[in-house]
Image (cartoon, rainbow, N blue to C red):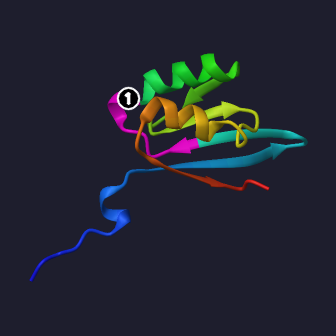
């Protein structure tokens, strides 16, 4: 009996969410990045997107100031290579 791999089994997923915090302010949060790469990716995203950002307290979530749903897929795709990027909350 063989186990077939589905696309979900062998493909890494990065989840991007756009959240409105108050008024017109928005925050882009990114989850699913490996722990050893997360600080380098945060620095590179801040530089390429010209925005502020930080890590959550548990160092598992990248938070960027602003709505970057339009360009985050291209930037992360070039940085991380073969990953599936799922954008939630994009209109």
Residue at numbered disc 1: 37
Magenta-drawn segment: 30-37
At label 1, counting other C-alpha atoms closer than 10 Å, the crowd grade (few under 14, some 14-19, many 20 or more) is few
Residue 80 position in % (x across, y down): 43, 34
Image quarter (top left, top right, bottom left or bottom right) of the C terminus: bottom right
70 over 55 or under it: above or below: below
Q: Quadrant of residue 3?
A: bottom left
Residue at point 30%, 58% (across, down): 10
Residue at image position (40%, 43%) is: 82
Residue at 36% in and 55% down: 11
Work out whether 3 lies above or below 32. below
Question: Where residue 56 sits in the image (x, y, percent)?
Answer: 53, 35
Q: Is residue 56 visible?
A: no
Q: Is residue 64 left or right of residue 35?
A: right
Give SS at disc 1.
helix
Q: Quadrant of the N terminus?
A: bottom left
Residue projecting furthest to the left: 1
Measured as percent of width and height from the top left, residue 25 is found at 83, 38
């Amino acid at each position: 009996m063989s186990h077939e791999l589905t696309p979900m089994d062998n493909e890494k997923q990065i989840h991007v969410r756009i959240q409105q915090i108050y008024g017109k302010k928005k925050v882009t949060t990114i989850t699913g990045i490996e722990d050893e790469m997360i600080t380098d990716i945060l620095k590179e995203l801040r530089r390429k997107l010209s925005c502020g950002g930080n890590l959550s307290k548990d160092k598992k979530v990248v938070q960027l100031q602003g709505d970057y749903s339009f360009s985050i897929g291209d930037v992360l795709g070039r940085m991380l290579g073969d990953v599936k990027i799922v954008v939630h909350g994009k209109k």
